[in-house]
Amino acid sequence: MATEELKKYIQDSFASGRTIEDIYKALLDNGWQEVDIRKAFQDLGIIKDCQNQSLNKTKTKRLFIYSVFICVIILLSGATFYLWRDRLDLSNINEQKVREFYTQLSQSQISFTDTGEMVFPDEQKFITQKMGYIQNKNNFIEANLRTMEITLYENGVADKVIKILTKGKERSWWETPTGNYKVLGKSVNAFSSIGNVWMPYSIQFYGNYFIHGWPYYDDGTPVAQNYSGGCIRLSTEDAKVVFNFVKTGTPILVLENNKNDNFGILNPKATNAVLPNVNAKAFLIADLSSGEVLLEKKAEEKLPITSLTKLMTGVVAHEIIYLGRSIKVTSSMLANVSETFQPILGERYVGLDLLYPLLMQSSNESAQILSGFLGDDVFVKNMNIKATSLQMMDTQFSDASGVSDQNISTAYDISKLLQYIYYKRPFLFDIGKGVAFDNVGFIKIGETIDIPNLKNVNEYIGSPDLIGVKNGETSAAEQTLISVWNIHTNQGDVPVAVIVLGSENRKNDSDILLKWLKDNFSVI
């Protein structure tokens, strides 16, 4: 059956510049029936009956393309083995071929429409998951923060569209998180201890984040238009409609726009590229503006990541705990750890203050205080839930500090986390560099911890182009290091991540990779 949702998807895809063949293939891959697809095209008047013949040939064409692709993989695999032994001649080779060799067939997380418009990875995941829910005829919610609309889907069919009135400010401390979530709980009128307001028809979908009606104070006064703690706010009347539609477990897809047309482009230079001599077990260089991998070695190998774990600890602590409150230190939070930052048993520390020793000094005690506030098991569970929402499918967390070698990830997965932090939680990179914030809204920072006198143990501190950095080390995992850099090009700046896992000398390996990047791509 050619449903309205199917027709709308085809219309939107065709309007964005995608070809008929691409749309047809995508729908087949997502389980739509061929007869329904053809009927939808006909109903929309996009194609005529005679053009259906070309669509019928698509399957044959796809088989041919896949066969050719397999042959290309075999050929390039042999070429890649040779390149790692010697060098790659970049002269007279177009940009796409250079990328194929450098990435060793690693897939870019970004895709493009036929008109060249970027489709960012969270949008692609959003579309894929949405099509799956439609195919399975699920009830679900689509919260599109780009169009500021919520769509209710009943049995996989769009039933009602509701206007979103406010959301968390982009790139702020309280930006609304994107991803694949579900209804965790409902309350006809929930009280927010963060804003000291009542939130009618509240639907919790992740940590401190809710869909709700217009909030108001105890005396009935509604909050100001510009006040937001990151929740998705609707009119109270519309919130009641959504409240009655969902039940616990109903999927909620949240999409935001990451697009930034001011990013530059890293163009390979036409010269011989000597491949870097790096001893790390795995490494990766990635363009965070697009998710594209520029160079990698064993980037999909699962390895212990040690204190890089604390990047996820910072993300989850911020998103599921109200860090404006103080947290009392108990004896269980201090068990078997001793770090530069030495909290006092029984004292209270503001949650935002604790992020500084966590990310500047890799403080295990800060990690334990933050996770212990909710309970270690609950906190770690949320770390793994967040990893899944970011499609970090080869990642597993077992504690908040990274002490255990069971904190496992890949360089490729870590790049997804770095991309999320860059777009959604950039202040975590700032904190890791020791940038002092006086306050966040009404929350005063630095009253419970002497932040200016904290020693920063991260490398590259003070480098002018450094965006973010975090290191780690255990005897079993050896040394790990992520650094994110602002690379200057004639077209604009490009954020690039350098990730090193299982290294004997993380700083030296990162230096070599950063030099390789600047030597072999057009940068200023």
Image (cartoon, rainbow, N blue to C red):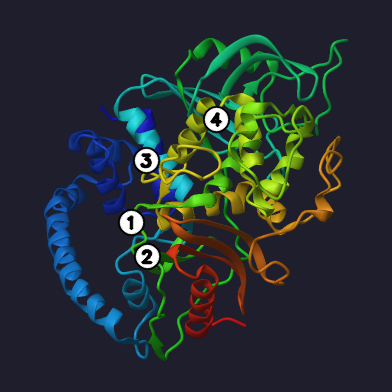
Image position of 371 (left or right of 278) = right
Q: State the image coordinates of residue 161 (x, y, percent, origin top left).
A: 54, 25
Q: Nearer the viewer, mark 4 or mark 3?
A: 4
Whichever of labels 1 and 3 marks the residue nearer the N terminus, that label is 3
Q: Mark 4 Cα within 10 Å, few/some/many (few <14, many 20+)? A: many
Give the Cα distance between marks 2 and 3: 33 Å
Q: Residue at x 79, y 30 (%)?
A: 347
Q: Which residue is mark 2?
A: 281
- Disc 4 target residue: 379
Q: Which residue is mark 1?
A: 301
Q: State the residue at coordinates (60%, 27%).
A: 207
Secondary element under disc 2, as helix, strand or loop, is loop
Q: Give the Cα separation between the discs numbered 2 and 1.
A: 9 Å
Residue at x 40%, y 80% (from the top left corner): 277
Quadrant including the C terminus: bottom right
- In this image, 360 relative to 246: left or right? right
Q: CA distance from mark 1 to mark 4?
A: 26 Å
Residue in the foreground of this view, choosing between 366 and 319:
366
